[in-house]
Image: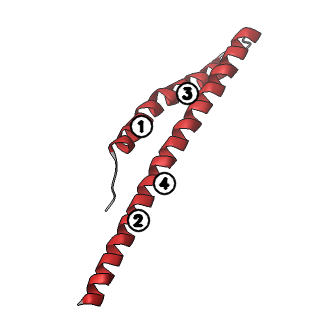
Amino acid sequence: MCTVTRSDEILHSLVHDLRQPLSNLETSLFYLEMVLDHPSDRVRDQMRIMARQVAQAAALLERANEEVHVKSVHRETAGSDSLHLTKSATAAVT
């Protein structure tokens, strides 16, 4: 049985909801790189900045998602261990 806290649910929803707009930005940047034959230096610099910021935000979301997963697995494992010990202790008494 997996125990999920309210903060984990909020963080999971936040990660899920922010991935879509980041994906759209990433796709738009890719498209612009394909269709712009000779962008000015200013446009190229702005696109690089945007791509770097999108990548940083995506990495942050991925780390947050992994953290929620690790905490969830840790709680699940701790819960199953304590349940196992309880069953063992009960069996030893019986």
Left or right of residue 64, residue 59 in this image: right
Residue 36 locus on image (x, y percent): 67, 15
Quarter of the C terminus within the rendering: bottom left
N-terminal label among 2 and 3 = 3
CA separation in Å, label 3 and label 4: 30 Å
Q: Nearer the viewer, mark 3 or mark 4?
A: 4
N-terminal label among 3 and 4 = 3
Left or right of residue 71, residue 2 in this image: left
Residue 84 locus on image (x, y percent): 34, 76
N-terminal label among 3 and 1 = 1
Look at mark 1 in the image and give the residue it sits on: 16
* Residue at the image point whose x is 50% and y is 48% from the top: 67
Residue 57 locus on image (x, y percent): 56, 31
CA separation in Å, label 4 and label 2: 12 Å
Residue 63 locus on image (x, y percent): 55, 43
Left or right of residue 67, residue 8 in this image: left
Q: Is residue 21 above or below residue 70?
A: above
* Residue at the image point whose x is 61% and y is 32% from the top: 55
Look at mark 2 in the image and give the residue it sits on: 78
* Residue at the image point whose x is 41% and y is 37% from the top: 16
Q: Secondary structure at mark 3?
A: helix
Answer whether labels 3 and 4 touch (C-beta < 8 Å). Answer: no
